[in-house]
Image: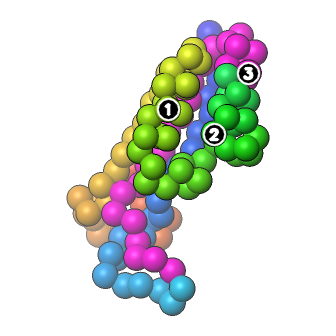
């Protein structure tokens, strides 16, 4: 029954004040994204070589990260096409923080509880 495995990644922050900019830091992100790659545990051996090949081809053998790609949408498309070979499902939650409203959200940790 519990034969699935997930790899999670998040992007964004829990800041809800979009007007302030801390010294040396960018403005708060307007979105918070959580993404999971989900597969059967038995498929991990099949997925691993695909991810290693993508790492070698597009990231010089390093971490697969969109920060490396920047706004190169052609490269992003190539990587997504390569990922299509791996047998996993993608699950993502995208929160537009500008739509998040509530009294309790003035406490920093409440944002994470709110999105759950």
Please state the horizontal and vertical placement of residue 114, each as a whole percent of the image: 39, 54
Residue under label 3 = 49
Instruction: Point out which mark residue 78 bears.
Output: 1
Q: Could you tell me which residue is drawn at 34 percent across and 50 percent down?
A: 95
Q: Could you tell me which residue is drawn at 49 percent across and 41 percent down?
A: 75
Question: What is the C-alpha distance between the residues marked 2 and 1?
Answer: 9 Å
Instruction: Point out which mark residue 51 bears.
Output: none
- Labels 2 & 1 near each other (Cβ < 8 A): yes
Give the quarter of the image for residue 52.
top right
Instruction: Point out which mark residue 58 bears.
Output: 2
Give the quarter of the image for residue 101.
bottom left
Q: Against 92, is 14 above or below?
A: below
Q: Is residue 76 left or right of residue 52?
A: left
Indicate which disc, 2 or 3, sits on the residue closer to the N terminus.
Answer: 3
Crowding near the residue tagged with mark 3, few <14, some 14–19, many ≥20 C-alpha atoms within 10 Å: few
Q: Nearer the viewer, residue 83 or 116?
A: 83
Question: What is the C-alpha distance between the residues marked 2 and 3?
Answer: 14 Å
Disc 1, SS: helix
Quarter holding the C terminus is: top left
Count of numbered labels shown in the rendering: 3
């Amino acid at each position: 029954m519990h034969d699935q495995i997930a790899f999670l990644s998040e992007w964004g922050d829990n800041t809800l004040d979009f007007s302030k900019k801390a010294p040396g830091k960018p403005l708060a992100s307007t979105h918070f994204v959580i993404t999971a790659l989900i597969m059967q545990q038995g498929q991990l051996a099949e997925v691993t070589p695909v991810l290693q090949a993508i790492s070698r081809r597009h990231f010089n053998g390093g971490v697969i990260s969109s920060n490396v790609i920047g706004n190169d949408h052609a490269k992003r498309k190539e990587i997504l096409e390569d990922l299509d070979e791996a047998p996993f499902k993608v699950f993502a939650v995208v929160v537009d923080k500008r739509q998040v409203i509530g009294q309790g959200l003035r406490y920093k940790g409440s944002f994470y509880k709110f999105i759950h």
